[in-house]
Structures are given as structure tokens and as C-alpha cells.
Image (tube, coloured by chain):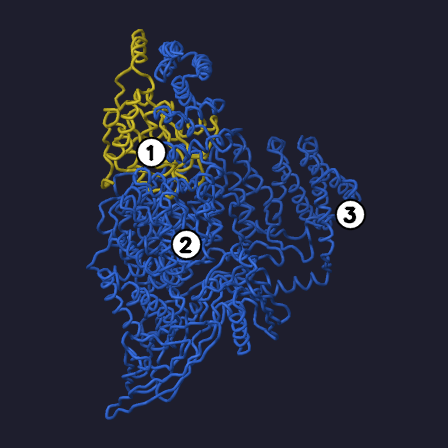
């Protein structure tokens, strides 16, 4: 054995190591491949040895060879062997090799699971680190599923080095195993506030990456990120967060408003260009999201544009590039502010750097106007001539066409000019974009009727000079334009001056060298031309016969074509012409009939038209057209059998026949609709308005440049001439207008008024032609919406998961150990987002916690709060930050369905003083004024409280409650403020709202008592923390114009329910209401009641006494009331997941009852919403007209409902552990519905 | 996300390749060739961003590169990365190499590809930026090297002696491919 080892190490002396291999390859430059194949043989034999060091060495060399392009997947198993070595040196080599060449298809990966798990839990942090790094490169769905839990544990590792790697790799795990996202998310969120900046940065990185793909799920994190943004100094983190905000703002414009200020500050203060640039980018995103009517942000735009200008003017090309890039984003929404920097951008077109020129080109796209289009295009044409390198030139060409054709040729005033530009472009050598030019020519000629005459003339010249385009075989791309030319000449041949000549040009022998599809068009259009020529020669039969003869002579060339299409068309037409010739010889008038062959106009069809044809009613594309083969035949073929079994279902669907009448009716309807649709551009008189009262165009710069055009096609006008012509035309227009203007002025002077004519505007330039731009045709009943073409294979799609929902049992990550030790959460638990994740290390602590929870839930919670708070670093000075803090806290601890509402609040509060309140005041005049002061009152003590909070943990419980009160208050506030947030209280309802029509506003507050002085409305809510308490919230509304004070509230306690009075008070003492009510103001107070049994509803008698104080007198008043404790008020909305729900029902401990409601006319989701809202249920699952719902009483009774609807009848099957409670609840539900 | 990191020399010879998305070997080589073709024809005084490069991704992706003496460092990233940030990261990476190899030159990368990979792994992990603080990176790399040394390394002393003997009869060993002025000024970027 010893000998073997010695022998092994002696062998090793003569093994090549990596350095030797590299050296060897360098020394065998001539026969490298041969040398490497020898080396690979050596490596193969090395891999067969037992010595792990030898193997590792071999694998290391393989990694190098892999880089050179050699496939080394055959050694995958050896790589796994080296990975599993206990020595770090070898392990590292193994993992490196694996990360370079393993992928999802590598089958040995499944062997690695246990090894990786072992490495992850290694005491050596670098073993763990190497494993994490390697895994990040080759993680598969299986590995992700099996290791997710181990990695999640590592996220709380003591070493930040491991923590940050574990956090980062979670992103890869999420991608491969989306189910892990929800259970892992709370911890990931926690890492945003990790003390180690590296870990924090990693967490930001991961969340940004997630949020980029599915931003809406991460909106609720905005407050947290906002805090990070204002506190972090790490530029990497800042950049990521700012980028993230850029992705979030489009979803929530209010967020944008909040961001503008801190971002602007950053822009002013930062010296880091990268940060500055990202800030500018996000500000732009914000401005885009706010684009509608925010005049007061023009300063921000100016700031951005100004900063970008500095970037563009910088000598550093990188900054210049980025500046242009960002500028193009502004351009979309604020073109005006960019247009003022036209000089700078045009200058960039001359830059030596192609990337920069391309960016500048992008910008040009948005900078054109009717006024400067010609000028800009002229400049671009110059560049086209100068450009070396075809790619850039092609890019220029496409840009010119893009610029001109954008938004339906909006900026083109003179289509003759455009056609001549297109013709000029055909002279480009070696362009690939011949088809692009061709399609433009066709499009313009077809859609702009007025230009057809000119276009046809130009095309005829092109055809005449076709040899110039085709002369060089290298220029095949451009001959595509002949396709367009031939078609235009043929189709619109009535505009041709000399059709005969064109016909001859099209039948030249040289045409046969063109590509087949172009020849085919030539032949077909020659026929059209022939018809036109015949017509023009009707009076001269001799000439007509000559033309026929010409056709008969020339066409055989095409009949012999190798191209099938050409051949077929040519022989068809040849036969036709021969027949015509025969008729001509008999002196028969044929011209008319030949023309009839090509009568009618071809209209353009929209490219999407085919896709938009709606599927006719009753058409089932999956149904069999013929009877399917009988089952016996296809028994051996499984797929067929499947279809056959499905078949009966399809046959049931009735095929409605769409008859002619119906079609005609639809067509009529469509026409009607089009006629009424202002956006449908009809082929009717000019769509462009001509404004009369405008001054001239003096300041359009006339650039006189002598163009030496390389190739002149004789007879073609140059686009430059058009620039001049256009100039003159506009001048003339202007003069005309001036004359009119003068006239008008003279008239106006009579009235003693002088109207200042402003600077020339866009619309002032009248088009040279009266242009009808026809729209493309769409099929009848075309579906208006564009279906987005999302890639169904996008892995990020699976990560579109709502993270605000509390976790369900089923969503725990799979663990291998201690599964039985997990405490089964009662359905829904307290749903506060603190998830119990199986975690071996913390197990003991967790268990304790769990016990505690049972005993004294509150205290645990408050302790956790404290912990939370310690993590939140905050400035004690900043009041504002504190409020925010409190809100974040609420956000974190409250039941998640309200997270959205909290975000709402966070967003509204800050904008409050200025715009939001104004907006509220402006848009919702019916806001009760009294809401305002109460809100102010509410906020102030809150600040005080949060101060207290830090000092006195004992008060925590109380705080919690107040906080909750505050939250409720907020809801209330919302409720009065905006109808749309009315039902936010219940998350499940909100979901429904999204998909169906909005719910009518609802309120849980019922009238308690009312007299001339005061009105009391109340709502009863179960106390989440205490099974024997309910909270009664009463809103007191002062109806008088005097102050109500010294209000005292008293209730006659019953055996079952008692008002909670301060210690030392006797059971008959009244409680004073902690506020006075100024005139016309309302405020809310809460009273806690202790209850023993909750299975029965109960009524308590009570009295409110108060003093009405007017200026001169004060009177003592009293109001009696009855507090009605319904069974519903003991229920607490608790989310529940379907599997937990199913388990609950299966358990068989529940007693059942049922209820039938008839004559319910409201939509089903309204009924559900009612039950949810008024009776504190949540929807577990809903399938069509059936829904299961769940709620829990404060004493832990489960209440399950199965609600079904059919024909205005809602039937409810219910189960509960306490029959009495259930029946009472059902009674109350019945009442709710009978009230409506 | 970073999609790929490529290092090649002025002749297009790969010195380190790291793909964070799977490509077969021949595809990898083709990407290297194409990227080299794109990058090499650019002057040194033009911007460091390149769009296109059809092989490596759609419009969301960009090539961000830096040219140091004989080597090109090319990162292919998508729009979630800050362009200037990545430029800075390349600088950090090269400076880290410089520290770890003491005046790094192309030869170091040629003969110690595995070490370069180890350093890179401390900077970028699975396509995401892991660490940008150079001192932290260097510290972690050194700790790992120390561990390796304590284990005796891949080729312990005897093998090294042999390798020295083997070296003797080599023709000239090119030694002075210094990468020159490594501290190319990063335009007005504050240190990360």
C-alpha cells in the first residue's frame, strides 16, 4: 500500500500540471490540435487512477481545455468525484469545473445533491462558499427544490460571507423552483436590513432582480426601499434601488411624486456619475408616469435635460453615449425640452464613434417636425454618402425611412419630395434594405392618392434605368425596388405618360436576370400596362396590333423561365394576348374587355388583419370535421383514443350558421361604427387642417450644399430641388397668408384690437398636396385590443407571485428533518406574515416561542416588535422618519391584506400638504369637513406615542392597540374620503374587485342612537389578541352648532358581557369619552367589553350623558341606546388556504346547518363581498357560482361556509364547531340580505 | 444580471470565459469570435458600450468592455445593471488581479486561469455582483489561498521542482507582457 502511494507520487512528478499543459500548447503552435488530443488521452488515463490529486490535476487541465472549446462533458463523473474530495484545494477545482461545464442536461448532477448539502453545512465557511458559488452556475429545478431549505438556513448564517452568497443564490433558486419564493421572502426582506453592507447589497440585488420582472408584487416594499434610499451611502445599493424605483413608478404615480424630491437632491449632491445618471433615468421614468398634466415638474425636466446636456458635452465618450441614451427616454414624453438641444444632437451625428452616432440617430427620430424634416433628412442623406461600412449606412437608411414614415407620415408635407428621397436611396451600393425602400414606395403610392401621378412617373424612369440598379450583381438587394416600381406602374398605369415605353422597358430581355419574384411582378404588370395601352390606342387599331405583337414577341422569354411563378403567369398572359390578337385581326373592340380584367382597386390590408379576424360564433377548431376513425381502429394509438373520448363533448356544441343576411348586417354595422369613429381615417377630404392666421417661415435655414451625387439617374429630380421648391412654396404660402393676415388686421384694427401672431407652429405648414392617407383595412369585428406577445417560456413568469398573502401550511419548504416537530399552524394563524420556517438551528427558541404564543400571544408579539424596532435604524430627531417608521411597522405586523392600504396611506400622507389635499378637495367636494381635524388630532398623539414606545416596553400592548385603532381610523378616513377604497378592509374582496365590476360602497357602522344633538354609529370588532374581548368603536357626531362636552358613556353590564373599566372603578361607573366635540365635528372612541360566551347575540342597554354648551348657556342632555352584540361581531376575518380548509372539513368535528336565501338579485361576487364585509369572512376558493368561505371566532371556533348560487337563490351550507353560534351567524346573514 | 464575462487578448485568444447561461462549447467559441470581432475594430477612444452582438442576446443586452494593454475584458449585461457601475466593476476586478498577482500581466492569466476564476467568483456570483469592495475580495481570496497552501496545494514541492527542471529547456519564455498603465482613469466616478 505504502509502495503504491510512493509510486503514485513519483508518477505525479511526470504528470503535466496546468502550467505544463499551457506551455505545451504554446510550444506546439503548428500542430496544436494534435498535441491537445495527446494531452486528452493522458488526462483520460490520469482520471482512471485512484489518486484524487491526480484526478484533480486532470480536471483542472480539462477546465482549461473547455475554455479552448473542447467538449469535456465526458468527464462529468470525474468532476463529481473531485468535487466530493474532502480537501478544499480539490473541491475548489471540482466545483470550478462543474460550474464551467455542467448544465441542466448533465445527468450526473443528480448525484451531487447530497454532496452539496454536506458542503453547505460544512463548518469551514470556504467549503460552503465554494459550493454556493458552484451551485449558482448549475442549479437545476431538482437541486433547487432539494436544497432550498438548506440555503434558506444559510441566509441567517453567522458569517456575512456566507450570508451574502446564500442571499444571492436564492434568486437562482427562485427561478428554478418558484414555490420557494413565498416561504423565503420574509427572510429575504429581513436581509434588506442586515448589518453587513455586503449582505444588504445582495438582498437589494435579488429583490431588484425579482421586482424588475414582476414589479407590482413588490410595490408594498416601496416604503422600505425609500428608507434605504435615504439612508444608504453605498452607491451600488443606491443605484439598484433607484433603478428599482424606475420600474415601480409606472405602476404607482403617487410613488413618483414622493421620489422626485429626494432624487433631485441626489442629482444635485452626488459626485458619482453613475449614480447621477441613474437618478436622472428614474426621474425621467417618474416624469413619464406623471406625464399627464403636471406643469410644476417642468423644473425637474429642465434639470434632467440640463444634466444630460453636460453629459453629452463631456469629452468622455461613455458619458456622451449614456447622455444620449437617457435623452431618448425624455424624448418620448417631453419632446419639446429635447428639441431645444437639436444642435448638440446633430453634432453627435458627426462623432467618430459609431455607437454614439447610432444613439444620436435614435434621438433624431423624435426631433423632427414638419418644419425641419427636410432639413434633417438632407443632413442624413449627406451622411449616407459619406458613411463607410455598410452596417452604419444601412442603419442610416432605415432611420431615414423610420423618421419619415413615423406616425402615419405625420411630418411629411411634400410627398413628391419623399418619393424622390426614396428614389435617391436606391442608388446606395450594397444595401440590404431594398425591400424596405420598396415597401415604402408601395405604401406611399397606394395610400397617398394625390401622389400617384408623380410616383408613377418616377417609377417609370426607374424602370427605364433598371440597368443602373442591376448592372452590378453585388447590388442585388436594391433590385427589390424594381418590384415596387413595376407594380406601381402597372397598377396605376392610367397615370403613365407613355405607357407603351414603360411596357417596352418592362419586357426587355435583361429583365430575365432579375430574381424570380420580381420577374413575376413584371410579367403580371406588363399585362396591366398592355390593357392600358390598348385602351389608349382604341382609335388606332394598327398601333394596338403592334403592341400585341410586341407582347407576343417578348413573352416567350419568360415562358421559358426556370421560376414556376414567372412561367405560369407568362404562359397565361401569352395565351391571352394571342387570343386578343386574333380578335384584333377580326376588328373586334377588345380594349374595354381587357381593361375589365384588371378593374377594381386594391386596398391596403393591415398586417395584423389576419390575426384579428374573430373566430365566428360556433366555430370549434378542435372539433372533428369528418367523423373520427372508430375507436376499435385506433386502439393501439393512444393519442387518437384521447381525442375520440373527448369527441362527444365537442359534438354537443351547436354550430350556428352565419348566413348571408347576418353577414350583411354586420358589415353594415361596422360601416356605421367606422363612420362614427373619429379615429378612423376615412378616404374623405383632407385630414390635415389648414390654419389661416399664421406668419411665415422666414427662419427656416436654407443650407446650400453642393451635392456631388455619385450616380445620377438621368431624368430624376433630386430631393434637394424639392427642398428649395418647398422653401419657395412655403414662402409663397406665407406671402398669401400675410396678405390675408393684413386684410384681417385691417379689419381688426377697425375694432381697435391688435392680435399678436405667435411664432410659427407645426400646423402652419400646409402640405403641398392634398393628402388622403388611407388606413389599412381590418377585418369585420376585429378585436380592438392588442394581445401582448409575452414569451410563454419566460422563467420569470413563474415568479409572478403575490408576496403579501400570508403563508399557508402547504407552502413550507420541504425539509428532510424534524418535520414532525413543526407546530401545525391553525388555519390562518394570526396571518401577520411572520412565518414559521422550519429551521433546525433555531428550533428550540422557536418552540419556546410557540408555547409562549399560546400562553401570552401579545407579549411575544410586542417583544418581536421591539426586536424589529432595534433593527430599524432611525434618527431620533426626525419626526417624519418616525411616522414612516411606525407605518412600516404597521405594515410588517398587520394582517397582510391591508398592506396595500398601508402603502396607500404611505403614499398619500407625504403628498398630503400640497397636491393631494388639493386634489381631494377639488375632485371630491362631498368630503365631510369634519374628517380633517380628526385626522390631524390623530397624527399628533401618534408621534408622541412612538416616542414613548421606545422607552417603555410595558406599554407596548396598549400601543399595539392604539396603533391598530389608528389604522382602523385610517380606514375610516379613507372610507369617507374615497369611495374606491371603501372595501379595502378585506383583502379577499379586493381581489375580487380587480376582476369584476366595482362593488357598491359598504359600511359596517350601524346606527346606535340619535337625537337632536348627537348621532352615534358603532361597529363591533373582535379583539385579535384576547379571546374574551371585543372592541366597540363608536363615532360620535355633533349635529349642533354648539360644543358637546363632558360626554360620559355607561352600559348596564350583563352576566355575560361587561364594559372594561379602569382599575378601581365600580361596575356601575360611567366612562368619560376622551374628547369634546366642536360644532359639526365627529370623532371616534373605542370601548372594550369582556365577553364570556359568544354563541348568542346579546343586547346591552346604555346611556350617554353630555353637556351642550352654547355661548350663553349649557344644558345637560342624555341619550339612551342599545348595543347589539351580534354573533358576527365575534368573528374575525381570517384567511385560510384550501388544503387547510379541506383538512378542517374532513376532521368531522364540525356540526352543520344550512340556509337558503331567495330572490337575491345582486351579482354573486357582491353577495360574497357582503358576507365578507359584514360578517368577517374570507373567501377560500371560488369556482364559478360556488365559493367556500372561512372565518374564526375570537374564541377559536371555525366557521366554514359553502355558498352556492343559482337562479336568484343563494344557498349556504355551513359548518362550525358550535351549532348555536353557527345558527345565529346564519340568521344574521339572512338579515343582512333581507335588508337589501 | 451579467450574462457572460469574457477575457481575451488582442488576437482573440480566450483567456477566461465565464457564461452564466448555458451555451454549448462550439457556441461559446462562436460568441467569443463574434465579440472579439465587434470589440477589436473599435478605437481606444470611443465609448465602452456596444449594442447588438446577435449571439449574446436581444435588445435588452449590452456589451460593456475595457481594453487593458493586451487584454479585453468584456461583460455582457442586461438593462438591470448600471453601465457605469459595470465599467467600475471591471476596474475593480482588474485592480484586484493586479493585487493578487502583483503586477498582473497576460501571462498570469494564461498560466493561472484557475486562480483568476477564483478571484472572479468573489466578485460576481451566478451573474450577480457579489462584492465590490476590493479589500474584502482580496482578503477572501488570500484566506482561501492560505487554506490551499496549508493543505499542500495541488502540486506539492517535488512536482514543482520537476516543473522547474522542465522549464529549463524551454526556448525563451515571454516574460514582459506587462499590462502597462493599469490604473486607467475611471471618469469622475466616486469610489464604490
Residue at coordinates 27% horizontally, 84% vertically from top-left?
Answer: A1045
Q: The residue tagged with tag 1: helix, strand or loop?
A: loop
Find disc 1 in the rendering and name its residue.
A123
How many discs appear? 3
Disc 1/disc 2 C-alpha distance (Å): 72 Å
- What is the CA distance from the residue labelled 3 to the residue labelled 2? 62 Å
Q: Tell me the chain of label 3.
A: A
Local packing at callout 3 (Cα closer than 10 Å; few below 14, some 14-19, many 20+) is few
Relative to the observer, which residue lies in front, A1101 or A658?
Answer: A1101
The residue labelled by disc 3 is: A627
Along the line of sight, the residue nearer the viewer: A808 or A93: A808
Question: Is residue A250 left or right of A617 when viewed as pictured?
Answer: left
Residue A213 image point, x, y percent: 43, 48
Q: Earlier in the sequence, mark 1 or mark 2?
A: 1
Question: For numbered disc 3, what is the local secondary structure?
Answer: loop
Say whether marks 1 and 2 touch (CB < 8 Å): no
Q: Secondary structure at mark 2?
A: loop
Residue B114, percent across and down? 35, 24
Sequence order check, earlier mark of 3 and 2: 2
Q: Which residue is mark 2?
A: A370
Q: Dot 2 surroundings within 10 Å: few (below 14), some, or many (20 or more)? A: many
Is mark 1 in CB contact (under 8 Å) with mark 3?
no
What is the chain identity of the residue bearing mark 1? A
The reply to whether residue A69 is in sight is yes
The hue used for chain B is: yellow
Q: Which chain is the one coloured blue?
A: A
Amino acid at each position: 500500500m505504502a509502495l503504491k502511494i510512493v509510486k503514485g507520487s513519483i508518477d505525479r512528478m511526470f504528470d503535466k500540471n496546468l502550467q505544463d499543459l499551457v506551455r505545451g500548447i504554446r510550444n506546439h503552435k503548428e500542430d496544436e490540435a494534435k498535441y491537445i488530443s495527446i494531452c486528452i488521452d493522458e488526462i483520460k488515463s490520469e482520471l482512471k487512477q485512484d489518486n484524487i490529486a491526480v484526478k484533480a490535476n486532470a480536471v483542472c487541465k480539462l477546465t482549461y481545455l473547455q475554455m479552448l472549446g473542447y467538449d469535456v462533458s465526458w468527464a462529468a463523473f470525474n468532476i463529481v468525484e473531485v468535487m466530493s474530495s474532502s480537501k478544499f484545494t480539490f473541491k475548489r477545482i471540482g466545483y470550478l469545473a462543474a460550474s464551467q461545464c455542467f448544465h441542466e442536461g448533465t445527468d450526473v448532477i443528480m448525484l451531487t445533491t447530497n454532496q452539496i448539502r454536506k458542503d453547505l453545512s460544512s463548518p469551514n465557511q470556504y467549503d460552503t462558499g465554494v459550493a454556493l458559488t458552484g451551485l449558482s452556475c448549475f442549479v437545476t429545478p431538482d437541486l433547487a427544490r432539494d436544497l432550498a431549505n438548506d440555503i434558506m438556513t444559510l441566509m441567517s448564517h453567522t458569517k456575512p460571507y456566507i450570508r451574502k452568497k446564500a442571499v444571492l443564490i436564492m434568486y437562482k433558486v427562485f427561478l428554478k423552483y418558484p414555490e420557494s419564493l413565498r416561504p423565503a421572502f420574509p427572510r429575504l426582506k429581513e436581509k434588506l436590513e442586515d448589518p453587513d453592507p455586503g449582505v444588504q447589497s445582495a438582498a437589494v440585488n435579488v429583490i431588484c432582480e425579482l421586482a424588475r420582472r414582476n414589479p407590482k408584487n413588490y410595490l408594498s416594499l416601496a416604503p422600505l426601499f425609500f428608507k434605504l434610499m435615504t439612508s444608504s451611502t453605498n452607491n451600488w445599493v443606491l443605484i439598484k434601488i433607484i433603478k428599482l424605483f424606475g420600474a415601480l413608478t409606472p405602476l404607482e404615480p403617487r410613488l413618483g411624486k414622493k421620489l422626485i424630491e429626494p432624487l433631485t437632491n441626489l442629482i444635485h449632491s452626488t459626485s458619482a456619475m453613475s449614480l447621477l445618471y441613474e437618478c436622472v433615468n428614474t426621474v425621467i421614468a417618474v416624469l413619464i408616469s406623471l406625464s399627464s398634466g403636471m406643469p410644476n415638474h417642468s423644473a425637474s425636466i429642465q434639470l434632467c435635460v440640463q444634466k444630460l446636456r453636460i453629459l453629452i458635452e463631456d469629452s468622455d465618450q461613455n458619458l456622451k453615449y449614456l447622455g444620449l441614451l437617457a435623452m431618448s427616454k425624455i424624448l418620448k414624453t417631453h419632446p419639446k425640452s429635447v428639441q431645444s438641444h437639436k444642435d448638440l444632437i446633430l453634432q453627435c451625428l458627426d462623432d467618430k464613434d459609431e455607437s454614439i452616432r447610432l444613439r444620436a440617430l435614435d434621438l433624431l427620430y423624435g426631433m423632427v417636425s414638419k418644419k425641419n424634416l427636410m432639413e434633417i433628412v438632407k443632413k442624413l442623406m449627406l451622411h449616407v454618402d459619406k458613411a463607410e461600412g455598410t452596417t452604419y449606412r444601412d442603419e442610416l437608411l432605415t432611420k431615414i425611412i423610420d423618421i419619415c414614415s413615423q406616425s402615419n407620415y405625420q411630418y411629411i408635407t411634400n410627398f413628391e419630395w419623399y418619393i424622390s428621397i426614396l428614389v435617391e436611396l436606391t442608388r446606395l451600393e450594397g444595401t440590404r434594405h431594398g425591400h424596405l425602400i420598396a415597401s415604402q414606395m408601395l405604401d406611399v403610392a397606394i395610400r397617398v392618392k394625390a401622389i400617384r401621378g408623380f410616383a408613377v412617373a418616377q417609377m417609370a424612369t426607374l424602370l427605364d434605368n433598371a440597368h443602373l440598379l442591376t448592372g452590378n450583381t453585388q447590388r442585388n438587394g436594391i433590385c427589390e425596388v424594381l418590384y415596387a416600381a413595376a407594380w406601381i406602374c402597372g397598377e396605376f398605369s392610367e397615370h403613365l405618360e407613355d405607357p407603351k415605353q414603360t411596357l417596352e422597358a418592362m419586357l426587355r430581355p435583361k429583365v430575365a436576370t432579375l430574381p424570380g419574384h420580381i420577374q413575376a411582378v413584371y410579367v403580371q404588370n406588363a399585362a396591366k400596362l398592355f390593357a392600358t395601352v390598348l385602351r389608349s390606342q382604341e382609335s388606332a387599331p394598327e398601333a394596338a396590333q403592334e403592341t400585341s405583337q410586341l407582347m407576343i414577341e417578348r413573352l416567350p422569354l419568360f415562358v421559358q423561365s426556370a421560376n414556376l411563378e414567372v412561367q405560369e403567369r407568362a404562359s397565361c398572359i401569352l395565351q391571352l394576348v394571342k387570343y386578343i390578337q386574333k380578335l384584333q385581326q377580326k376588328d373586334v373592340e377588345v380594349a374595354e374587355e381587357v381593361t375589365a380584367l384588371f378593374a377594381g382597386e386594391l386596398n391596403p390590408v393591415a398586417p395584423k388583419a389576419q390575426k384579428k379576424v374573430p373566430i365566428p360564433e360556433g366555430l370549434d377548431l378542435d372539433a372533428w370535421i369528418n367523423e373520427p376513425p372508430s375507436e376499435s381502429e385506433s386502439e393501439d394509438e393512444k393519442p387518437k383514443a384521447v381525442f375520440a373520448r373527448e369527441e362527444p363533448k365537442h359534438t354537443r356544441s351547436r354550430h350556428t350558421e352565419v348566413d348571408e343576411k347576418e353577414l350583411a348586417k354586420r358589415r353594415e354595422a361596422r360601416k356605421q361604427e367606422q363612420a362614427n369613429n373619429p379615429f378612423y381615417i376615412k378616404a374623405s377630404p383632407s385630414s390635415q387642417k389648414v390654419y389661416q392666421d399664421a406668419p411665415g417661415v422666414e427662419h427656416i435655414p436654407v443650407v446650400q450644399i453642393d451635392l456631388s451625387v455619385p450616380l445620377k439617374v438621368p431624368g430624376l429630380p433630386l430631393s434637394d430641388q424639392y427642398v428649395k421648391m418647398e422653401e419657395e412654396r412655403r414662402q409663397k404660402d406665407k406671402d398669401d397668408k400675410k396678405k390675408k393676415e393684413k386684410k384681417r388686421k385691417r379689419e381688426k384694427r377697425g375694432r381697435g384690437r391688435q392680435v399678436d401672431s405667435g411664432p410659427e407652429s407645426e400646423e402652419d405648414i400646409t402640405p403641398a398636396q392634398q393628402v388622403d392617407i388611407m388606413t389599412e383595412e381590418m377585418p369585420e369585428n376585429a378585436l380592438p385590443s392588442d394581445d401582448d406577445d409575452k414569451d410563454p417560456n419566460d422563467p420569470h413568469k413563474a415568479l409572478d407571485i403575490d408576496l403579501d398573502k400570508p403563508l399557508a401550511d402547504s407552502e413550507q419548504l420541504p425539509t428532510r428533518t424534524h418535520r414532525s416537530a413543526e407546530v401545525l399552524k391553525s388555519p390562518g394563524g394570526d396571518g401577520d406574515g411572520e412565518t414559521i420556517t422550519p429551521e433546525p438551528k433555531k428550533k428550540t427558541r422557536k418552540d419556546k416561542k410557540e408555547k409562549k404564543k399560546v400562553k401570552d400571544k401579545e407579549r411575544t408579539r410586542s417583544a418581536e416588535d421591539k426586536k424589529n424596532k432595534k433593527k430599524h435604524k432611525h434618527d431620533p430627531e426626525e419626526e417624519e422618519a418616525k411616522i414612516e417608521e411606525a407605518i412600516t411597522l404597521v405594515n410588517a405586523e398587520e394582517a397582510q391584506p391591508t398592506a396595500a392600504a398601508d402603502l396607500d396611506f404611505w403614499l398619500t400622507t407625504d403628498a398630503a400638504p400640497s397636491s393631494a389635499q388639493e386634489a381631494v378637495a377639488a375632485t371630491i367636494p362631498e368630503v365631510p369637513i369634519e374628517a380633517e381635524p380628526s385626522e390631524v388630532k390623530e397624527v399628533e398623539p401618534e408621534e408622541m406615542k412612538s416616542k414613548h414606545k421606545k422607552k417603555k416596553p410595558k406599554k407596548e400592548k396598549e400601543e399595539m392597540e392604539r396603533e391598530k385603532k389608528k389604522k382602523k381610523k385610517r380606514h375610516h378616513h379613507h372610507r369617507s374620503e374615497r369611495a374606491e377604497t371603501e372595501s379595502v378592509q378585506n383583502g379577499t374582496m379586493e381581489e375580487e374587485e380587480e376582476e369584476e365590476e366595482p362593488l357598491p360602497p359598504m359600511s359596517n357602522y350601524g346606527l346606535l342612537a340619535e337625537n337632536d344633538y348627537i348621532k352615534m354609529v358603532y361597529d363591533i370588532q373582535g379583539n385579535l389578541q384576547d379571546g374574551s374581548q371585543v372592541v366597540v368603536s363608536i363615532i360620535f357626531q355633533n349635529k349642533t352648532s354648539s360644543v358637546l362636552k363632558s360626554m360620559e358613556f355607561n352600559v348596564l353590564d350583563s352576566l355575560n358581557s361587561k364594559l372594561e373599566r379602569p382599575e378601581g372603578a365600580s361596575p356601575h361607573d360611567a366612562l368619560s369619552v376622551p374628547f369634546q366635540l366642536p360644532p359639526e365635528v365627529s370623532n371616534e372612541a373605542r370601548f372594550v367589553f369582556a365577553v364570556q360566551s359568544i354563541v348568542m347575540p346579546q343586547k346591552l342597554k346604555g346611556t350617554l350623558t353630555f353637556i351642550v354648551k352654547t355661548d350663553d348657556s349649557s344644558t345637560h342632555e342624555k341619550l339612551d341606546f342599545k348595543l347589539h352584540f351580534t354573533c358576527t361581531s365575534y368573528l374575525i376575518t381570517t384567511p385560510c388556504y384550501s388544503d387547510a380548509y379541506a383538512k378542517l372539513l374532513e376532521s368531522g368535528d364540525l356540526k352543520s346547518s344550512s340556509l337558503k336565501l331567495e330572490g337575491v338579485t345582486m351579482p354573486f361576487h357582491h353577495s360574497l363581498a357582503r358576507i365578507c364585509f359584514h360578517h368577517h369572512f374570507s373567501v377560500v376558493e371560488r369556482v364559478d357560482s360556488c365559493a367556500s368561505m372561512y372565518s374564526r371566532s375570537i374564541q377559536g371556533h371555525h366557521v366554514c361556509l359553502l355558498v352556492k348560487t343559482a337562479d336568484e337563490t343563494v344557498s349556504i351550507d355551513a359548518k362550525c364547531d358550535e351549532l348555536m353560534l353557527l345558527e345565529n351567524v346564519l340568521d344574521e346573514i339572512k338579515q343582512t340580505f333581507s335588508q337589501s | 444580471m451579467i450574462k457572460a464575462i469574457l477575457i481575451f487578448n488582442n488576437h482573440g485568444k480566450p483567456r477566461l470565459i465565464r457564461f452564466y447561461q448555458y451555451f454549448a462549447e462550439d457556441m461559446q467559441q462562436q460568441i467569443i469570435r463574434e465579440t472579439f470581432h465587434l470589440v477589436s475594430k473599435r478605437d481606444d477612444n470611443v465609448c465602452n458600450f456596444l449594442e447588438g452582438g446577435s449571439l449574446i442576446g436581444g435588445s435588452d443586452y449590452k456589451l460593456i468592455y475595457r481594453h487593458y494593454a493586451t487584454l479585453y475584458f468584456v461583460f455582457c449585461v442586461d438593462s438591470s445593471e448600471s453601465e457605469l457601475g459595470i465599467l467600475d466593476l471591471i476596474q475593480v476586478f482588474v485592480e484586484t488581479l493586479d493585487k493578487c498577482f502583483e503586477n498582473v500581466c497576460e501571462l498570469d492569466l494564461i498560466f493561472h486561469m484557475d486562480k483568476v476564476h477564483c478571484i472572479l467568483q468573489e466578485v460576481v456570483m451566478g451573474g450577480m455582483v457579489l462584492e465590490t469592495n476590493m479589500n474584502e475580495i482580496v482578503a477572501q481570496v488570500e484566506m482561501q489561498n492560505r487554506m490551499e497552501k496549508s493543505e499542500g496545494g495541488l502540486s506539492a514541492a517535488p512536482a514543482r521542482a520537476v516543473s522547474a527542471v522542465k522549464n529549463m529547456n524551454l526556448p525563451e519564455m515571454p516574460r514582459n507582457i506587462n499590462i502597462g498603465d493599469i490604473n486607467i482613469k475611471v471618469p469622475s466616478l466616486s469610489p464604490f
